[in-house]
Amino acid sequence: MKTILFLIATLAFPISAFAGQEEARLAELDAFWAEVSRTVKEGDFKGYSVTCHPEAVLVTGTKKASYPLTQALARWKKEFDDTKSGERESNALFRFSQRLGDGTTAHETGVLHYSFRQGGGEMKHEYIHLEALLLKKDDGWKIIMEYQKAPATEAEWKALE
């Protein structure tokens, strides 16, 4: 009986240790996505850029294209500047259907809800199926591939609550 209890305790420890590591990894990734959301909301272009690996790639399913994320950043800079100055209101929120990875890698699948309003105009909402590949570096998680697959619906967004 003592042998069986010892085996159960021995086998249970690694499982609980793994569960604790997974919870910590997901908490770090949640903090990463919260930081991305914050930078978009505040128009913090420098802060947003720091979340991206220098060699990151953006893949767009709607445009059927792939190119360095630095090119997209250059295109998005005006929107960040307009948000920072108060001329624009921007928000980016993320929900996930699948989160794979280990201590240094992550593959996140879900929906991005991007909303914006220019000046006093009407708030516009975009829902986008998203996959992201991230690496954990010395200074935190960095996105190395963002795949904006296809438009999503508000219902698909809500289903991930």
Image (spheres, helix red, strand yellow):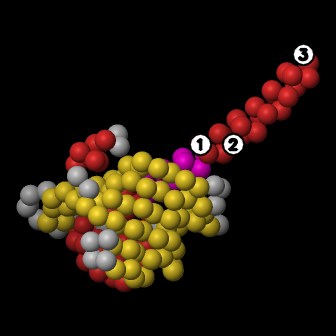
- How far apart marks 2 and 1 lie (CA) works out to 9 Å
Magenta segment, which residues?
23-35
Image quadrant in which the N terminus is located: top right
Residue 73 coordinates in the image, percent (x, y): 36, 78
Tell me if label 2 and label 1 are in contact, CB under 8 Å.
no
Q: Is residue 120 left or right of residue 102?
A: left
Give the residue pinned by disc 2.
18
Where disc 1 sits, the SS reads helix
**Label 1 is placed on what type of residue?**
Glu
**Label 3 is placed on what type of residue?**
Met
Tell me if label 3 and label 1 are in contact, CB under 8 Å.
no
Give the residue pinned by disc 1.
23
Question: Is residue 10 shown above or below 133?
Answer: above
Where disc 3 sits, the SS reads loop
Taking the magenta stretch, the answer to whether it contains residue 24 is yes
Instruction: Indicate which disc residue 99 carries.
Output: none
Question: Is residue 80 shown above or below 128?
Answer: below
